[in-house]
Image: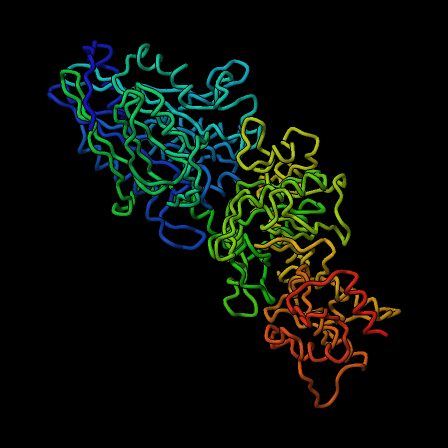
Amino acid sequence: MASHKRTLRRLTAGAMTAALLMSCAGVSALAAEKDTFTLGIYSTTDMHGKCYDLNPIDGKEVKNSYLKVATAMKEERAAMDGTILIDNGDIIQGSSIISYNMNMEGGVDNPMAICLRYIGYDAFVPGNHEFNFDMETQQIFYDMLADTSDKYPGTPVDALCANYINIETQEPNLKPYKTMTFDVGGQEFKVGILGFENVNVPNWDLPTHYEGSDFVHKDNTERTYAYEWVNYWQKALREDEGCDFVIVASHSGEDSGLVGAGDGDAVETGKTDFSPENQVRHLVENTTGIDMVIAGHNHKVGVTEMKNADGQTVPCVNGGTSTLTKTTVTIAADGSFTIGQSENLDLTTYENDAGLKELMQPYYDRTLPFITEQIGTLSGDWDDETDLFHVQSDTMNLVHEAQLWATGADLSLASPVANKDFCIGQLLNGAESAPISLKDCYSFYKYDNNLIYMIEMTGKQIKDWLEDCTKDYTVEADGTITGGGFGTDQLYGMDYDIYMGNPEGSRVVNLTYQGKPVTDDQTFKVALNSYRLSANAAGDEFGWYATTGITMGTDAVLWDGSVSEEFGSIGGSVTLVIAEYIKAMTAEGKDITPPKAKSHWTLNAGTAPAADTVTRQAFVEKLFEAQGLDPVPEFAKAPFSDVTSTAVDWAASEGIVSGDGAGKFNPNAPITREQAAVMLMNAATVLEKGPTGMWAVQITYADADSIASWATDGAMWNIIQKYIPVGEDNLFNPQGTITAAEAAAMIAALMA
């Protein structure tokens, strides 16, 4: 609860007329004859295109859309002497309806602008997702908000942003703030509303989307809101404008430790230091003169009270994608005001506004057939892997294949952005085949604002970036690996293994391309999404720029899907490119089946084996080479999802190997001594040198009890043949590894 004393100004006739006009436009209500005036301040944030009551992708009800906000605000305006309604950004991205409008209709007649106008918002502060689109498309949206004709329903909405700064002039590109005046007992009470965009937009969006601009003034080297307020806007609002009450609406989270991760979700990152991305607390604690803050971006629902530099309480509200915040301010005729309770109104308790639904119906009707039309047929034995950050999967392999198809690149980089616990195999639901549509593509690549690009990278840059990605993982006490996020890429087209037990900087090992080790100076064409190219020295949230030095403005960029002949019409969206890939396969008469993986990777909790330790695949290849087959016949494809090798095909067809029982061969895992014993016995049988009939010998090794049951025959055969030698201690060491020299000696003994 906060009470403040201000000197109210007597309204002049002109000011009274202006206030009346504002009331007619839905901006305020007058209470000239009352001793007190109750002002309701409301906000939404991160609504991400929720303009209709049904989600075209899954047909489920959207229970917290702008249709609910419209109903809630009609009730609230009737109960208050005056109201202020602010949207805090991230509105023109996030639903299939707005995606269709932005990507297929160029944002013309933008449904989100109509929502804001119809509901009667007083101000709109852009979020970072407003910058997902080119400047021309953004301008269409802002022009619609500002339109004063009768072309669009509702009333104009002021777009506010004090820190979207033209680099050359050092002036804001949008209106930095607005003031609203209310009559309290015949005197003027002035409210200032200042907008701040997230300063980290350069981390996520292309420079061409904010060309010639930055998100702080050039002297603000620490990129803080506090600096912007103290040096540029505090005097303007408090002294020049004479505001009695100041609201700062900032598209930024309360604290550095929370980041947005979906509708109504906020994920704790563990960070405690200052973060430019989420700096509302830093703003409040280091300033004075701000009465209230509206936060957003991190998708956190709630109200937080913070102390400013003078120890005064400042309420901070956050609608968190799903609620309407409400704060009441009671203003007395003597100039004092009291900030009452802040709360989050549950939008699910309101009915949908029929008038707004009618306006949005045509947008839904155009979107639905576009995303539900069958674009291909799914069939084949898809895996059921949903742990996409930690295990190679058919789902991510399809994403990579689409990126390679679109770009013609050698390699593909991508981070899993599927819906939680989703994999493509679920679409079959046990059937042999199933239709696939664009809405299904959204299920395994939900961010259609990611655009497809191709760049050139060196072997060193690739390895360094993969090393940096390993920092997102954590090895838990029980050996499981957790972690991974939007900055955690997987590489397709090269084989590699990650060993988290190794020191940072040396976790990525066995990096090979087409069977040969990758060198630092090799160059490769790499397909990836636009977010990797938006980083620069000023903003580098994921570490891409620090690791590679590649930005949108460098010569390393070879191809831009958003302006390409092939994909410019769909904006270069990765989600829509995947759909185009499926359409192309369908046009060739092909079903969409699990891709035959072009490469393999593993994530391991322990340390990498010694450099000369032989892997399972290498051992089988040495066995195969020893056969001296000339010419090499064709063998049936081995039933393993994680390896492509003629030697493994041979070994599987001859019964020498059988995999792990779960459809994988684990080619890059070190071969153990007991595994080698079984393979050597099976190979001996193929060579007609193996055991026949009923046979058995006693296993006399000192550690016989530690030999796996499936390996006992191999161990017994080794007792007889001594392919794998033991020392004077008579320990077989069944789980031990072998060197290349030892493998060569074993196979030589077999072939002798």
Is residue 435 placed above or below 458 in the rendered structure? below
636 lies left or right of 325: right
Count of labels in the image: 0
Q: Quadrant of residue 84?
A: top left
What is the basis of the colouring in this image?
A: rainbow
Quadrant for the C terminus, please.
bottom right
- Quarter of the image that includes the N terminus: top left
Residue 643, x across and y down, in percent:
69, 62
Q: Quadrant of residue 711?
A: bottom right
**Toward the viewer: 134 or 674?**
674
Residue 257 appears in the rendering? yes
- Tell me which residue sits at (63%, 42%) in the image: 505
Left or right of 154 on screen, residue 424 = right
Residue 636 image offset from top left, x and y in percent: 74, 71
Q: Position of residue 534 (x, y in %)?
A: 58, 33
Name the foreground residue: 423 vs 515. 515
Q: Residue furthest right?
A: 630
Residue 419 lies, with reference to residue 730, above or below; the image says: above
Location of residue 108 with respect to 474 vertically, above or below: above
Q: Residue at left 72%, top 69%?
A: 727
* Res. 589 visible in picture: no
| Closer-to-camera residue (108/661) | 661
Query: Along the horizontal axis of the image, is 1 left or right of 521?
Result: left
Percent position (x, y) of residue 16? 21, 14
Q: Identify the residue at horizontal 61%, vertical 50% (top origin).
A: 580
In the image, residue 5 above or below residue 504: above
